[in-house]
Amino acid sequence: MKILLIGSGGREHALAWRLRKDDPKVQLFTAPGNAGTGQMGTNLAISATDLDGLTAWAVKEKPDLTIVGPEAPLCAGVVDRFEKAGLPIFGPNGAAARLEGSKVFTKNFLLKYGLPTAPGAGFTDSLSAYAYSQKHNRYPQVLKADGLAAGKGVIIAENPMEAAQTINRIMDQRIFGEAGRALLIEEFLPGREMSVHVLTDGVSHVILPIAQDHKRLGEGDTGLNTGGMGAYAPAPFATKELQAQISQEVVKPVLESLRKEGIDFRGILYIGLIWTKEGPRILEFNVRGGDPETQVLLPLIDTPLVEIFQAVREQRLGKLNVKFNSNHAVTIVLAAEGYPGTPITGTSINGLELELAGTCVFHAGTKQEGKHVVTQGGRVLSVTAWAPDLATARDLAYQRAAKIHFAGSQFRRDIAARLTLDASAE
Ligand code: AMP
Ligand code: GLY
């Protein structure tokens, strides 16, 4: 089988690893990939958002399936392009990808169908945004650039001055470019966050184990926001009762509302949830697997990935019995010096070859330079481990991480460390 994988992060290396595990003979091509995907197959010098380049390659090479990792090509409509050319591809179409591509669109959708979310409103001119922000003067107040901003477009303002400055920077100065043409302002909701990944073919769905990301750079959830410094699954606080509540109050109503809205969503819908004192609230939708959540979810799924993805595409997920194992998985992100600001790149990485059973090192911002692997981006590696219990998985991940060295490496020592069952503890 020949597969084209689009993307270059830890998520994509984890997908490549899993596809190879399911089928050792698979032919893998990754656009553009990293040192890790390069070791599993062929990296193509085509960027993930070069839709012309991707389509031209696929028309010529006819992969049996294309799998899209990141949101940018999905929002740019890569699925529509491929389908128009008769090329099989896994991921939601451009209309469905708006759920991640426009936070104002999503808020309007959530409010229209009475789905549980923070009260808020969207604006296309800054004067109305200033007026609304001043009128709803409870702080913290959450301000979000409408479009894709690489996880940096959400600002939590602590006072009116900060809120006004944020509106100015996003809408008037356009610090996030076109993503700031519109702005969403919403109420701050305190609670515990969780990542709910739903596989859906538009008719049936399967909820994957609940994962938890660690978004802040520093231990104890301090410091700057990042793309994610580590994750684990299943979350111990996600009891059967809590999962049933998520399914009833969030997942089923969301999927039903999508159908009513005429959105044919086929792919992975990742619901960013916050558990408040009043129950679950939707913070955001992503239209792809999380990074680093994918790295901990894949080891928990037993059914071959291609079987699942093909069933989603062909709308027969309801007939597939997607099997999970009872392991727990943990991933620790090793980031470069400077991250989440401008990372220092080109630093040599040592110890990658020192294997440990039950672990795998997924590359993210890495590049092969001759025999050496060097840093190439902010998040460099996702060190992942799985075991029958969470504490062992965590120990294994840290043992493997301790074998890897590069100058300036930053990682959190408290990934999956807070194992309380009380979901209202925060
Ligand atoms: P988003 O990209 O919308 O998930 O926002 C990024 C992060 O900002 C989330 O993971 C939360 O930590 C935080 N956040 C977003 N919206 C809210 C909210 N309404 N209340 C509290 N925190 C929020
Ligand atoms: N881990 C957060 C994300 O993938 O959006």
Image (cartoon, grey):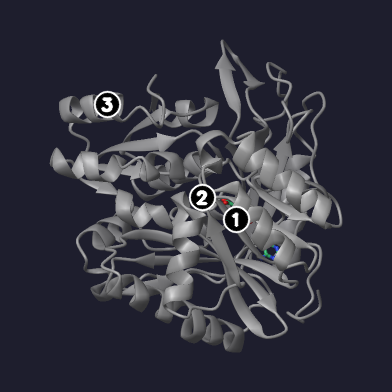
How many angstroms separate mark 1 from mark 2 (CA)?
8 Å
Report whether 336 appears left or right of 413. Answer: left
Name the secondary structure under disc 3: helix
Which residue is pictured at 24% across the width and 58% down the height?
A: 313
Up-down relation of residue 201 to residue 123 (above or below): below
Name the secondary structure under disc 1: helix
- For the residue marked with disc 1, what is the amino acid? Ser
- Answer whether labels 1 and 2 touch (C-beta < 8 Å): yes
Name the secondary structure under disc 2: loop
Q: Position of residue 2 (x, y in %)?
A: 25, 36
- Say if residue 225 shows up in the picture: no
> Few, some or many C-alpha atoms within 10 Å of disc 3 (few <14, some 14-19, many ≥20)?
few
- Say if residue 236 shows up in the picture: yes
Q: Quadrant of the N terminus?
A: top left
Mark 1 vs mark 3, foreground winner is: 1
Q: Quadrant of the C terminus?
A: bottom right
Per the image, the residue denoted by label 3 is 52
- For the residue marked with disc 2, what is the amino acid? Thr
Per the image, the residue denoted by label 1 is 128
- For the residue marked with disc 3, what is the amino acid? Asp
Q: Is residue 318 or residue 39 the one in the foreground?
A: 318
Which residue is pictured at 75% across the width and 41% down the height?
A: 401
Q: Quadrant of residue 281?
A: bottom right
Per the image, the residue denoted by label 2 is 124
